[in-house]
Amino acid sequence: MIADDRTEFPDPEGELRETTRAWDRARRVASSGTAIEIYTRWSRRVRVRIEPGVGRIEERGWDVGTAVRSHDPSMSTLGFAAASGRAAIEAVALARVALESAVRVPGASAPWSRRGERVLRDLDPTLELPSAGRLFDWLDGAAAGAARPATRWIEAAATVEAVAAEGLSWVRTRRRVWAVALGEGLPETSAARSLEALPPVPAGPGLAAPSEGPIRGPLRFGPRALAVLVPSLVRALHGGAPPLGLEVGPGWEVRDDPRFPGAVVGGTFDDCGFEAVPRALSRRGRVIEGVQGPGTLRRGSYRDLPEPGPSLLVVTPPMAALSEDRLDVLSLRIEPATPKRWRLEMDGERWVAGRSAGGVRGAGLWTDPVTLARACVAGSGEPAPCGWGVLSPALIFEGLGAAE
Amino acid sequence: MTTPPFQADDFEWLEALSRAVSSFHGGAPIATAFQEEREDRRVVLSTGRPPESTVSFTTGVSIRRPGPPPEEIWAAGISPEAVSPLLDGRTPRPERREPIPKAEDRSGPARIVRAARSLFEAATARASGDGRTGTVAVVGSAFRQRVRVAAAGGTPRADTREGGWLRLEVEGSDRGRTSGAVVEVVLRGAADPPWDDLARDAFARMESRFEAVPADPRVTDVVFAPGIGGILLHELVGHSLEGDLPRDGGSWLAGDGARVAPAEVTVIDDPRRGRVPWRYDDEGVEARAVPLLREGRVAGALLDRASARRRSLEPTGHGRRSGFRDPVLPRMGATFLTAGSVSPADTIAEVRRGLYVRRMSGATCEPARGRAIFRVTEAEAIEQGRRSHPVQPFLLEVEGPRSLPTIDAIASDLSFDACIGTCQRLGQPLSTSVGAPTFRLRLIRVLSTQELQG
């Protein structure tokens, strides 16, 4: 291992000052009336892996990048350019590229908040990361309870972001830890702000031996399946142009909560400086809101334009008793033939008369997002983190027909 | 296209990378130092959503030490002088050495913007005025990447990878029925593709598909149009022979020499051809063609340095990474089924009831089981040896162990890049190519939305 890790974490206020100075230089290359935004992102990552048959691997890295956006309201143009490197070095050259390659967006509104002089701050108390040794210890502990050996990794990261623009400046720091286990099918992921808060990832669902027989009764989706299902349904029903007023099942009670304590993504403002507040997406059996517009704009990296996206999807269905005949869906894959025609491929466990009747692999079911949301009737058990950005109890779906 | 081995600005980097590798572990078998400079451009023009244009420039270094445990250390935006301090555990200080290219530089990736506008204008000019055309969208993407690699005990290498493609999507509706079509084109050389022809093709396909009906789920015979079936080999054969898969239960193709297809079937992966070729991989290993199936038998695997060492074999030049931040994995370059001798028409003539697949838009596979599901977005029914009506999108399930032995007709019309794809593996996207002649498979399972109506 690298014995002498002398990482110097940047001072967030210093980053903001440097970004502001870079913005002051960069805006001079723009014509009068054209606004410039400078975004900088510094990040530090430590990842450790354990691969069956290979052993332990340690990775660490430093990333620094700058992005420039331009907005000319008179010509309705927007530009974007990004580069690895610090704003102090890159901003002026990037501003020229952004201005030159801007595209006309008729009717484009201001792409960032103009809040005035007040600096927005969202700062973690510390940016210190756990050592590689502690991360390996965590992986060893998680592997002890696993159904079988699998490639696993855990990554700890710290970021410092700063923005300077006409009418806007903000700075944010964040720590994040996430772990992945690659079993059969989809990887299993968990994430948290700190190692202490990270739920385990038990590689694979630990399926009972497959058995033949009909699948009767409702489907009960557990955390691993919901990590796939909930974001997919939110994209289909609450992204783009949401079908406001659409009837859904009483169990599809969902809100996006960027201010949830300990959420991995979120905070009091989004990546464009707009205030971020909890928003109910479905309530009392109706779609009432979409994940879109100010408050939801997030950057995947400094190389990406901000896009609407959820922060933490919190599902709060009414609770119901479990049916004695059901399929517990432990792992799910959604295969969309078209955006409105989905095939669910499910692994799980069949229950008959309250007793396990063996495992099920690859049970298939055709459905569509609206039918699926209408079939969501209730929840079961305690709320649990599901992957990166979902908090939900198990969800019960009724009336979807027989799985093959 | 790959470029001559070295350029003037390679030497300072190669010297720094070589020094880093030798200073640490002279002669260690898998220690490598990697540096990249990359430019990406993407443009979206659409009648249904706001246009976008993004440009990014990335530079970074990654050093791998053999351990134990093996370590990978990477940093963005640093200079050659900063490589040694990085290895000392110090926080790197990014500094730019070369200026960012000017936006008005029309060569390289910047060309994609003008090309996208030309295709968009051709398509919007063709859109019907009778309200049948809903949206027209053009997505263009292009990149250029220069990599420099030093490996312990090896010769320093440099390589350039570049490519650009455009996708035209048209959608429409007519009396409550919807239809759509996608046309893709790889930008090669300096000449522009025939924009009007591409637009005409997209609209003609969209118009023909208003009458599409659900695919018949009882069908078991499928013929793949030239080029398209390469996706099937990519998923079922290529992914199953990536050298880092566990040999014990990780792949259905683990047994060297095992027969899994008829003797007419030979599948090769050659990174030097296709739409984004490479001459040296990201570990500095010269790329070579690897027969994956030869005359129906498992013949080889795609190996980076680490997986080759575990198998006591030589690496094949297939070690790739999405960028300096990601670990090297064995990856496919251009995977193709070699040409046969049957005429394309004969592959259809003997089919009483089947499907002719023209386009697939995505796939997932399970290498351990040899099972893959493909999203078929354009296809026609085959009835009594003739192509008949278009069918609606459906899913195609193929189980390699049962299906590959049923390939019984391979035509002579080998074609590449009929469908442009990005392969995702362990979160790392990579531009890949596939190729195939027209061929026929006798045992597939159609997962059709017709089941919904039953």
Image: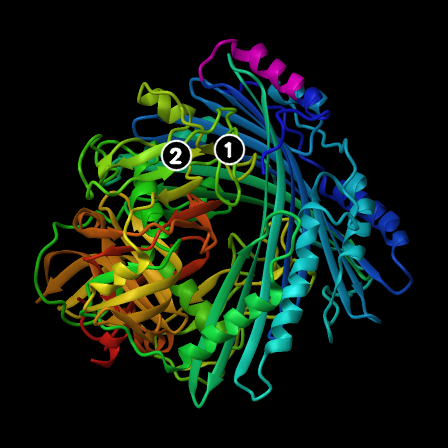
Q: Image height check: is B184 above or below B390?
A: above
- Secondary structure, mark 2, is helix
Is residue B174 visible in the rendered image? The answer is yes
Dot 2 amino acid type = Trp
Image quarter hosting the C terminus of chain A? bottom left
Comparing B333 with B322, the one in front is B333
Same chain assignment for discs 1 and 2:
yes
> Which chain letter matches label 2?
A
Could you say where residue A390 lies in the image, as x and y percent from the top left? 43, 59
- Residue A267 belongs to the span the image colors magenta: no
Which of the labelled discs sits on residue A130, or is there none? Answer: 1
Q: Which residues fall within the magenta stretch?
A: B14-29
Q: Residue at x 73, y 24 (%)?
A: B8
Comparing B182 with B82, the one in front is B182
Cα–Cα span, label 1 and label 2: 10 Å
Question: Within 10 Å of the Cα at label 1, are there few (<14), some (14-19), or many (20+) other Cα atoms?
Answer: some
Q: Residue at x 75, y 32 (%)?
A: B95
Could you say where residue A364 lies in the image, as x and y percent from the top left? 23, 64
Could you say where residue A27 lies in the image, as x and y percent from the top left? 86, 54
Q: Residue at x 60, y 68 (%)?
A: B196
Judging by the rendered image, the residue that carries numbered circle 2 is A138
Kindly report the secondary structure that dominates the magenta region of the rendered protein.
helix
- Secondary structure, mark 1, is loop
- Residue B25 belongs to the span the image colors magenta: yes
Is residue A279 visible in the rendered image? The answer is no
Comparing B54 with B205, the one in front is B205
Dot 1 amino acid type = Pro
Q: Residue at x 53, y 42 (%)?
A: B276
Q: Quadrant of residue A337?
A: bottom left
Q: Image height check: is A108 above or below A15?
A: below
Could you say where residue A13 lies in the image, as x and y percent from the top left? 76, 44
